[in-house]
Every structure is written in structure tokens, then in C-alpha cells.
Image (cartoon, coloured by chain):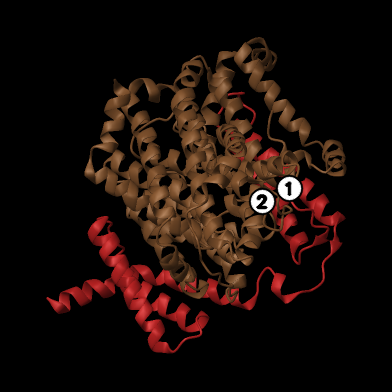
Amino acid sequence: MPTPRPSRRPGERLFAGSLVLLAGVALWQSHAIAGFAKLSSPGVFPMLASAVMLVSALAILTEVQARVPGERDPTTAPLPPRLLIMLALLVAYVLLMPRLGFLADSGLFLFACLSWLWRRPWWASLLVTLASLAVVQLLFAELFQVVLPSGAFDRWLRGALG
Amino acid sequence: MEAWAGLALVWLDPLMILLVGAGTLAGIYVGAIPGLSVTMATSILISFTFKWDVNEALALIVGVFMGGVYGGSRTAILLNIPGAPSAVATALDGYPMARRGQAGEAIGLTTLMSVFGGFVGIAALALFAPPISGIALMFVSRDYLLLGLIGILLVGTLSGESFARGAFAGSLGVLISMVGLDPMTAEGRFTYGSVSLMGGVPYIVAMIGLFGVGEALVQLRDVDTVALKQAITRVVPRWSAIRRHFWLAMRASGIGTVIGALPGTGGDIASLLAYDHAKRSTASPEVPFGEGAIEGLVAPEAANNAAVGGAFVPMLTLGVPGDAVTAVIIGALFIHGLKPGPLLLIETPQLFWFIVGALTMANGFLLLFGLTGIRVFTKLVECPKAVLIPLIVVLSAVGSYAIQNNPVHVVWMLGFGVLGYFLKVYGIQVAPVVLGLILGPMMDSNYRRAMLGARHDIGTFFWHFVSHPISLVLSVALVLILASQLPWRRARGAKGGTPGGTDPSP
């Protein structure tokens, strides 16, 4: 059930503003597809969708403006430091995957996350990392026959191991 | 005859029995572990199983769905953390019961009522889907357009903070689904000369990003929460308790089936409405509601599992998913080359009966797994979020890559994850986005067919919506839903105690 939340979240005005901007750009780009040429052209439905987006984004902005600003509380910040670190780890994880291959890359990512988030000795993190990799390899690569992303590193490793 | 053939496919094949059983057991844990959701698990699972035979994949997914809707109640009772949205109402009275030392009894009764509700939902599916698909055969393109709109609107209005947020999410999904080559004219839309955009946005990748990574990022905020444990005593419920609450369970199952069958509404809303019904219809509960009333446990649990069978009705007969999980399952059917809709029951009736059979069996397994292994369960569910979050990310990456072996999709998954995070943080639900993504192309092509049928005349186009009986009924439903969301109605509803957004009956 929707709970009424009278106070505004930090950064919510910026968020609502960017929704309006996004919807505006979407409407402009949808119009660029076929203009108002025909009522059944490929551009009509995207234009309708982005028009609804624009109207509702404006409504959200009005809603947000009407709320009282919430107190500055570090637990409700939209971008707490923890999230920024996680995002950096995620970007590194995704970008390194084609180089390291799935297993090595995921191993590094899991170990990094666990050593940072989980308050246990490093060997416990290492153990969980290795166990998870083993389960993923057995369950998905062997049982489900899923192709896992390979990379320059594991191709080299496989070559070196013969 | 086809019915028996389809049912036999599940019931007589040891592999299928194993898959349904494994799915149900896995589903119970997925549903129970806070931070893992059935929608998340199903979207990742589809990417792993799309190379399988369609029956095998469905057996597993159906099991996970059934188990997951039930599993959320366990953590709701034991830890006061609903493992899934459909178990929110269960925590209201289930946790107080556990605090009084009746955790075992609460779990036992929940299991029984879930199984009971599940069977009512499945019976409704088996009885009503064939006639509904008969009616659905008479649907024309504008009716499908209306159904799509109704589905997105219902999800949007019922699950979010405000109507505007739901409408934004739904239309955003529709817009994203437009990316790629237009299926009717092969013209590029939002492709900007990029080859990888021409194929469109694979909705499974978007789903994994929004439900998996996005949710994991949200969970990161309260990574350190520690839950309290409860002692387990008697699990098998008393016969007198079952007999006394039979009719309440029956009514709650009815509510659950109907709400589940409405396009766009699922177990979460069904259980809240059933809880509300129990509260109103129980004149003198032994224990007040909110302090451990057994009625407050029976009603939502019967309703949310009944909603599972109900949710399959619009998906299999109309091709419009009943809730977020069936939206994902529809994606699975598409991937296996099947087209859910009125023709599904005519062309592949054995598939319909296969699903009915798999659901029935999953429900049977629920009884078995529900009443056993609770002590082991409490140990496993305590998996800390610090371990869970990175694991969700890794599984999501495997899932997004596996569909087309395309490394670019992993980047997209991350993009959708970040989008999903911000939407969630600012009170916009991601379920309407996914529904828009799946229904968008269907609505687009049906809109254009309807417009061509009206020879590009707007007057004729709208006249058709009111001059044909089926279209008229659907149009009226759409207008009523929209009207219930008008600001003055909402304000009045809020004063009366029930916000306008919680009455989904059109």
C-alpha cells in the first residue's frame, strides 16, 4: 500500500528535474523518427509514450516541489560513499571481464567485495569466494551448459597449462 | 484428452518431477532470503535455461514461482522481514505469533493455507482459462491495445507512491521497448547507426539489471542489519484450527485468484486485500489483529498462493501477464518460440495442461518441504547481505551474458542496475518498466493495426472503441481506473481510510 511521505528525499528535486529533461529529449527524438507524417507511422507510439513520460515527469516535479525538505540524514543520502565504492567496483568488474575472463574477474570482484563488506578474516572471504566460484562453474558451466565470458587472461592461462 | 496428455507429461516423467521439486525447494529459499526475489531469480533462471526443452525450463520456473511466493512468509514469521513483497501482510501477525513462542504453529498453518490457496488458484486456472481464451479469440487489435494499457496502468497505480510515478515508469518501459528496428517497416528507431542498438534492448537483460543489480544496490544501504531468531516448537497445525478457518481461507483464496487474474496485480496486493478482508470479517478474534491473530496469517497466505494460479489466466489466455513474475515467464515463452495468447490453448493445449500439472505438483511439494526442514532452514537464511550482494551481481552478470553470449549486455545490465537503483530510491517501482518493456511492441503494432483499420481517421478510430461490445467493456474499465486516480478521488479516499489506489476492481 502506498505510504504518504510528506518530506522530500535529498536530491529528489534534481532527480525529478532530470526525469523531465529525459522525457523532453525522448519526445524530441521520437518526433525525429517520422514527424507527424501519418497516424500509423513508426514514430507515433514512441511520441505517445514520451508525451506520457513528460506529463508524468512534470507531475512528479510538482509533487516533489510541494514536499517539505527532509532533514539531512546520511542513511537516506542517494549516493552514500558505500554505493560509490560499489559502483567503482562494478565498473571495474564489467570492464575487466573481457580481459580477465569470467572466473578470474568474478573471483577478484567477490574477494574485493567480501573483504570490504564482510567483517571476517581475509581467509574466510577467500574461502567463500573460491566456494562460490566452484558452485558457479559446476552449476552453470557444467550443468546448465552456459558459456561463461572468456578473456585474454584465461585463454593465456589455459594455453600455459596446456 | 489433451489435458491428460499434458498432465501426464509432468506427473509420469521422473525428470519433470525432479525439476519441479528442485524448483520448489529453491523457490522457498529464494523467497525466504531477504534480498533475493522470485522475479530476480526467474529472470536470471530464464537466461540459463533457454537452451533447454521448453517443458523442462517451465517445470523449473513454475516450481520456483510457487515456492517463492510461499517462502517469503517464513522469514516474515521468524525474522519479521518479509522475504518477498507478497509476505508483507504475513509479518503483521506472523511475527507477533512467533514472539509468543508459536513460530512452529504459525509456519505449519501458513504452509497448509498456502497449499490450500494454491489449489484454489490452480483449479480456477484449469476451469476458467479455456472459456476465457474462447472469448479472447474475438479480441481485435484495439482490444489488445486496451489490455496492454490496463495492465501497465494497474501495475503502475497499485505498486508505486503516486499515479504519476507509475505512469512514468510504464511509459519509460514502453519507450525502451521501441529501440531497434521497427518490426512493421524495418525502420530504425533510436538506433543512431549503432548495430547493437538495432537488435533492440533484450528485455531479459533489462529485467536482470532492474531486479537483480538494482535491488542489490538498494540492499547495500542496510547491509549490517541483524535479525532476531525464534524458537521452533510444534509445526503440524491443529485440526480444530484448520476447520475453524476453512471459510476464511476459501474467501481469501477467491480474493487471491481474482486479484492475481487481473492484469498487473499479483500476490502482494492480493495478500494485503485478503488481510484487510480478514480484519473486517472477523468480529472477535482471539488475539487482536497486529498482535498475532491467526486470521491475519490465514487470509494473506491463502490469497498470495491463490494469486499464482490466477496470474497465469491472463498470461496464457490473453498474452498479458498478471504480475511481475508472469511478465518474466512470458519472456521465457517468447524465447522458446511460443506465443502466449488465445491461440496457445488451441494450438498447444498440452502446454497449457503441462503448466497446470506442474503448478499442481509444485503445490504438493510445497506441503512436503513446508512442513519439514525448518531448523536447517533458519540456519541457511541467515546468509549475511555482505555475502549475498556480490553473489547477486556475479549471477546477474552470468545471466545477462548467457542469453546471446554478448559482452555488451553485461554493460547494459550495469546501466539498467544503476537506473533501477535511482528509480527505487526515489519511489518509482521498476515492475511497470518491465511490463512496459514486454507489452510495448505488442501495443505499438496493435495500435497501428487499429489505426490502419480506421483508415487514419481519428474519429473512426475512437468510435471503434465504443461501438464494439468487447472494446466498450475494456474502454470503460480503463476510464474507471483512470478516474479512480484523479486527485480529488484520491484525497477523498484517503479521508475514508482506503486510498483510491488500493481498489483494483474496475
Q: Which residue does the numbered mark 2 point to in the structure image?
A: A22
Q: Which residue does the numbered mark 1 point to in the structure image?
A: A57
Of mark 1 and mark 2, the one earlier in the sequence is 2
Q: What chain is tagged by disc 1? A: A
Q: Is residue B346 above or below residue B96?
A: above
Q: Is residue B113 above or below residue A79?
A: above
**Left or right of B26 in this view: A152:** left
Tell me the shade of chain B: brown
Q: How many circles with numbers are drawn on the protein? A: 2
**Front residue (pair B252, B39):** B252
Kindly give the residue lying farthest to the left in the view shown. Answer: A162
Amino acid type at circle 1 is Ala
Query: Which mark is nearer the camera, 1 or 2?
Result: 1
**Front residue (pair B171, B99):** B99
**Left or right of B215 in this view: A102:** left
Give the image location of residue B227, x and y in percent. Answer: 58, 72
